[in-house]
Amino acid sequence: MKKYILPFLFVISIISCQTQEKKDSKIAVKTDHSIQLGSGTIQRIDSFPSKNIVPRPVDIWLPDGYSNNKKYAVLYMHDGQMLFDSLSTWNKQEWKVDEWAGQLQKEGKTKDFIVVAPHNISKIRWNDYFPEKAFNYLSKSAQDSLKMMAKKNNFEMTMNADRYLKFLTEELKLYIDQNYSVQTDKANTVVSGSSMGGLISMYAISEYPDVFGAAACISTHWPGAGVYEGNPMPEAIFAYMKEHTPPSKDHRLYFDYGTKTLDQFYPQYAETVNKIYTDNGYDSTNFVNRLFEGADHSENSWNQRLDIPFIFLLGK
């Protein structure tokens, strides 16, 4: 593989671009008919209030026939504005979450589930998604060097991931549990994302193993930020993971990666990731780290294989 040295801020910019009555009258929810869907409906909260993070939109996808007479599993997916409608995304691509979720449920391949999708805020996406505690596994000199590099590029390295996860688990999940007909246990509460969203999904199940029973981390951005020789972040992330692996007896983790564009930098980390989890009791029944030869780092690649992580997370 060719050696690439890409500017810190440049790579961060690549991975950053992305009327039912409720019990809580302070949060306004509306059915959004402007989103073009293949199945189901979207209910949108334009600005979910939070004491932890910058308020942002949250989309809640409900399958066709959603009913209060049954209980649904819940999939929390990051980068909500990229999931459903390519006509509204910055790059005119989408995950096709509504198509896959609707089809898999209709075919009986997964549990009945809803999707809760907080949007990202592009300017602070890295800050929200980088696994905060992993930074503590860097040496002081490495921390100082990264901060100097960020400052040189006019990038603020404030860490928000711990607060983002508090928002997800203590504010957003509480609201969903109280206002939708859902299962609330960890076996029926799962999380997923791609790139930096893959990192925050790994971090979510590691920090909150009592909340999330499974995570799908797609095209996980193991470099953590910029791709350059001597980058200390991957080792810091792996050191964190070794000490915070969720118990294998009742958790499942899915990872994958391609070989094109930004994904070309990920295969070198596969053996390390495999060893971390197998050393902690995981096997083929609850751990996947799958290569997709020729796949690139885009929604168009992820939407071609989304059924695989969905079945892993929510299969019957």
Image (cartoon, grey):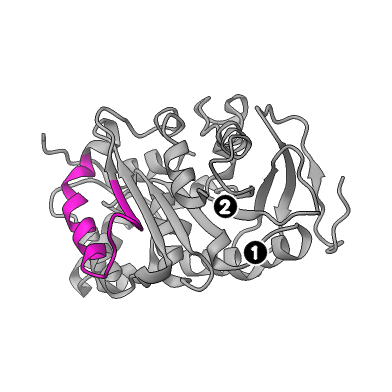
Give the number of the disc on residue 242.
Answer: none
> In this rendering, would 177 be left or right of 126?
right
> In this rendering, would 151 be left or right of 142?
right
Which residue shows up at 42% across the image and 40% down it? Answer: 308
Residue 109 pos. (x, y %): 53, 41
Give the number of the disc on residue 173.
Answer: 1
SS at badge 1: helix
Residue 110 pos. (x, y %): 55, 45
Q: Disc 1 vs disc 2: which is toward the camera? A: 2
Which residue shows up at 19% across the image and 61% down it? Answer: 275
Q: Is residue 119 above or below residue 176?
A: above
Label 1 amino acid?
Answer: Lys
The residue wearing badge 2 is 75
Part of the protein shown in magenta: 265-289
Label 2 amino acid?
Answer: Leu
Residue 270 pos. (x, y %): 20, 50
Is the C-beta separation of discs 1 and 2 under 8 Å? no
Report how far apart the C-alphas of labels 1 and 2 lie in the structure: 11 Å
Give residue 129's quadrant in the image.
bottom left
